[in-house]
Image (cartoon, grey):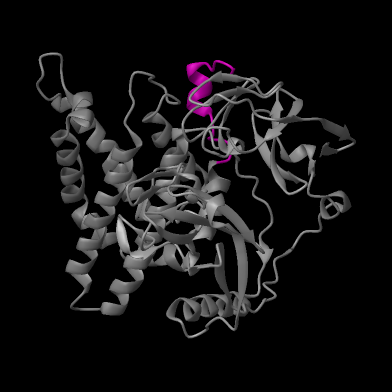
Amino acid sequence: MATQLTQDEKIKRGAEDSGRYFKYMAEYVGFTETDAKAIRESGLIIEKYIPEIVAKFYAQLLRYPPTRKYFLKKDGTIDQDYLQLRMHHLTNFWRRTTLGEYDDTYARYVDYVGRAHTSHGADPHIYIPERYVIGQVGFVQHAISEAIARELHEIDPEWEKRALSAWTKLMMVILELLARAYGNEREGETYAQRADINHKAVHDLAVQTYEIDLGIIQATEAIDLMVGQVDEIPEGERKIVQIENISIGVFHHKDSWYALRNSCLHRGGPVCTGLLDGDTLICPWHGYQYDLLSGKFLADTSTGLEMYPVEVREGQVHLNVPLIHRETFDLGLVEKEAQPQEMRSLKQNEFLVSQVAPGQAKLVFLNGESIAVFNAGGTFYATQNACTHAEGPLSEGDLDGVQITCPLHYSVFDITNGKVLEGPATEPIKTYQVIIEGGVGRVE
């Protein structure tokens, strides 16, 4: 169980690395000193509109009950003194932001504001749902964009472009700092060295993908696979087959045959193992729905699952899978910083103990099967990664002591023995032995 924090610890939590985190995310979104300069250049323009922006901001908060309640007196009227105090703080914040100076103190303040809206803040009675924080950041970004366009569009379009770009990127960073207070990330930021990549190769790969989608690059050969005898797949049933690295579901449905790629568009879930309701195939992971007859995604019929021709010959079901020649590119993903030899030579069933902090999990592979390795208070356990209910990824679930909760349908298992503690799963999960030698763990 998590250690109970004092209110003072809650206030300070996460603030220590705020400046570094701000710089890290600024680099990630491409916010540079040139952008900071563009914000300073537009500072007086934004300053002119701050009263209007602040007024619209709080009018929006007061409109909606989940946010309005924090500005009301006991008799239900608006507490004007408190409202004006909040306006004062917000006005000062945006005035300071227009200076274009984003040091550690600035970052810590943004981090503090983010936590003040959650249970990690000074007052545990105040909790503003994250959706409203995201919405208000977008609201302010739109207001700033309108102000810039109003003042600069006619007189200096290039200046307008620089300012809009700079403010957009800055708001991304501010939003990230505000949002990260809403939960403990499964993987905290380590500020690892960035990798060198071959940008041309990545571009060429994107072009290849685009041309395959347009049909410019087409299959040069096809595999004819005998799936099985017709009577092996009776009406209403299906069979999952594997061709090279492609999983395909073959369905016998309403006296016809259909074959679809067994990978949901959302997160690659085993869609072909899901419920078939009439002609609708439902992914067992997150409920994404597809038309079995066409493969179309019902929420957006412009896309869907890849389908393959099926033919019945002499009582046998044959699947025709076209193969497209995909050029392999040297993407140049080389770490700038030399890594320990043990990291470079790890086998698929091995992991670095230092990479799996208490309460976290890591995915490894044993004989082609994905295995979840858990660190439960310094002791390592390993189980199959696929939940026995709908194959949800247990390595992405919530670990509480030795109990893992599946992130899809919330089945709970004991990772020490695989037993089901809470449904909907009914079958236990497989467990494996973990051996630690030096700084390397191994699953057997």
The quadrant the C terminus occupies is top right
- Residue 285 x/y as whole percent: 47, 42
Q: Position of residue 411 (x, y in %)?
A: 52, 26
| Residue located at (37% from left, 65% from top) | 303
- Of residues 203 and 92, which is closer to you in this image? 203
Please say whether residue 8 is one of the residues in the magenta stretch.
Answer: yes
Looking at the rendering, which quadrant does residue 443 occupy? top right
Asked if residue 99 can be seen in this view, the reply is no
Residue at horizontal 70 percent and vertical 75 percent from the top? 330
Residue 229 seen by the camera: yes
* Image x and y of residue 33, in percent: 49, 64
Q: Quadrant of the N terminus?
A: top right
Residue range highlighted in magenta = 1-17
Up-down relation of residue 125 to residue 405 (above or below): above
- Left or right of 187 on screen, residue 351: right
Residue beneath the point at 20% across and 57% down: 48
With respect to residue 286, does 140 lie above or below? below
Q: In the rendered structure, does residue 29 fall within the stretch colored magenta?
A: no
Image coords of residue 154 (percent x, y): 18, 78
- The extreme front residue here reads 314
Q: Residue at x 25, y 33 (%)?
A: 86
Instruction: In this rendered view, identify the residue nearer to me: 379 or 309.
Output: 309
**Principal secondary structure, stretch drawn in magenta:** loop
Q: How many marks?
A: 0
